Image (cartoon, grey):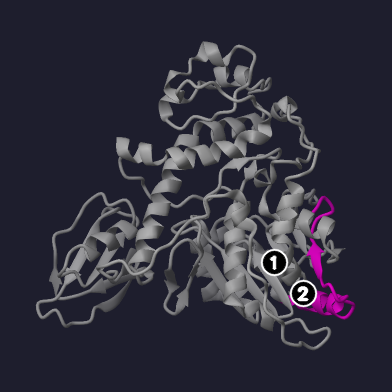
Amino acid sequence: MESDSEPDLALPAPRESRFKALVPLALACLACLAVLGLLARSTETRAEVKVEHALRGVVQEWAPTRPEEVLPMEQWAKVFKVDDLNSSTAQRRYYQYSHHPIFIQKKAWMEDQMSWQIARECPPLSIGIDLVLDKAMPAIRDVPSPSDCQKACTETPECLAFAWVRSGNLTRTCFRKTSATMLSMPTQVPKDSFVSGRPCLRENRTEMRFPTKELEQFKLPSPPPAPPRPRGAARMLCLAVCLPFTQEQDLLVMQYRFGTHIFACDNYAIYSSLLLELVPGVFTRRVNSTLLGELGGPYMTVLNLAAFMAVWKQVLADGEYLHHDWILKVDPDTVFLVDRLRPILQEHGRVLGQSGAYLNNCDMGLHGPLEIFSRQALNTFFESSEYCAKQLDGGKECKKDCSAFWDPNYRERCNGPCTLWWGEDIWVDQCLMRFTEVARVYDPRLLTEEHCHPQSGWRNCKDPSSVAFHPFKTPQEYKTCFESATGHELIA
């Protein structure tokens, strides 16, 4: 799941009742901002907070939850003591601050969608497919998402199928389909911009609940015993995570058609916040998370720890990893060359200790585009995640007064009550390195990456020793890099 991807879905028009429903979620989001060392705000409502009050020299513990509360950038800079407004760090921090109201609304909207879909046991949404029946119903314009179209079909008794248009002249149009006999099965017709499906159950069957307390996210069931595997074997289970209706999804569809990326591993699984049929027969697995994350932390990266803990919890529940020697998490925009990795895994596998190992891909610490765990290392992570969360939240490195955090040159690593201000890769690295016996093995051959001081010209992907290159965010960028690295033209 890439750091700045967002689903290309429009939000429904905000309603006052929706904002009231968001209050508990907004308060939960504010708790994440405690790392800033801001003093508790007064009992005034946010709507009553005045700029003059905010500029008294006391940085307050609050983020706007409604658009009208967002300060202009110059005033925000005074409140949060940011001197260089032109720095990329300051620009990203203001983006996070000013978009917080949009973020919490989008997250609440997506949680509502997911809860409804799970309760009605909705079938998957098929990407690039139109479902055709012999009788059309009145089209509905300006429908925000295919999930809303599926809901409209479900709430129409005679609706047997639907199609929602993602782009083009009919963007956001929902077509409900029926049959004169009510017995016909829809015909599948490939159409690139369409998302289609069948209605959900017309009554609730299942109830879902999102974690409400931070520690809940780190409580994982005990993993079952692992069956024996030959020493030095390199059977790979490769995992990808994607947000629906983003370029991540488009990259995975292209990679499947070319047989590259995770689809060249021994087995693969794709996790998302929705049940999707990316191409016929290739389905995502739903996790208990919207997978949305805000920018934040000392490096202004996406705070995706909670999202990925939900993914790891589902990986544990699925149990397939137990039948593999190595488990990989690979970002969709990573050009990943499986054939280069297999002999490296065999090499490391022959000397694995009883506690297993994870492979560090950057001398500055583990980076998320390509994460590689032995089976025993992943089991240890599952067993240790709650302990790690308690330990990492109990440190003293992140001081109560963190005004220096807002200095664009601030580079301290946070500990203390701020683990949700870390990306998933940093957190997993810290957990396994500091609190377990799992071996941390650095191998510079694993990743050539924009954020790990690559050599000049690295984007030509010519390094013959590199297993992966990151990031290449569009299908054309990915294709160009892959072909340059391998010398082979990609032909579907």
Residue found at x 38% / y 71%: 124
Q: Say whether disc 1 or disc 2 marks the residue closer to the N-terminus.
A: 2
Residue found at x 14% / y 79%: 182
Please state the total of marks drawn on the protein image.
2
Q: Amino acid at mark 2?
A: Gln
Vertical arrangement, residue 281 with respect to residue 39, above or below:
below
Residue found at x 59% / y 28%: 61
Tell me if mark 1 has few (under 14), some (14-19) or many (20+) residues whose alpha carbon lies within 10 angstroms of its own: many
- The label on residue 376 is 2
Q: Amino acid at mark 1?
A: Phe
Quarter of the rendering containing residue 255: bottom right
Quarter of the rendering containing residue 294: top right
Tell which tag, 1 or 2, sits nearer the viewer. 1
Near-viewer residue (255 or 164): 164
Would residue 465 appear left or right of 74 to someone viewing this image?
Answer: right
**Is 386 inside the magenta-drawn segment?**
no
Near-viewer residue (436 or 233): 436
Question: Label 1 to label 2, Cα distance in Å?
Answer: 10 Å
Helix or strand or loop: what does disc 1 sit on? helix
Q: Is residue 472 visible?
A: no
Tell me if mark 2 has few (under 14), some (14-19) or many (20+) residues whose alpha carbon lies within 10 angstroms of its own: many
Helix or strand or loop: what does disc 2 sit on? helix
* Residue where numbered disc 1 is placed: 382
Point out the image quarter for the N terminus: bottom right
Vertical arrangement, residue 271 with respect to residue 393, above or below:
below
**Is 342 inside the magenta-drawn segment?**
yes
Near-viewer residue (56 or 471): 56
Residue 9, percent from left and from top = 38, 50
Residue 274, percent from left and from top = 44, 63
Residue 176, percent from left and from top = 20, 65
Magenta segment, which residues? 339-365
Would residue 290 appear left or right of 259 to someone viewing this image?
Answer: left
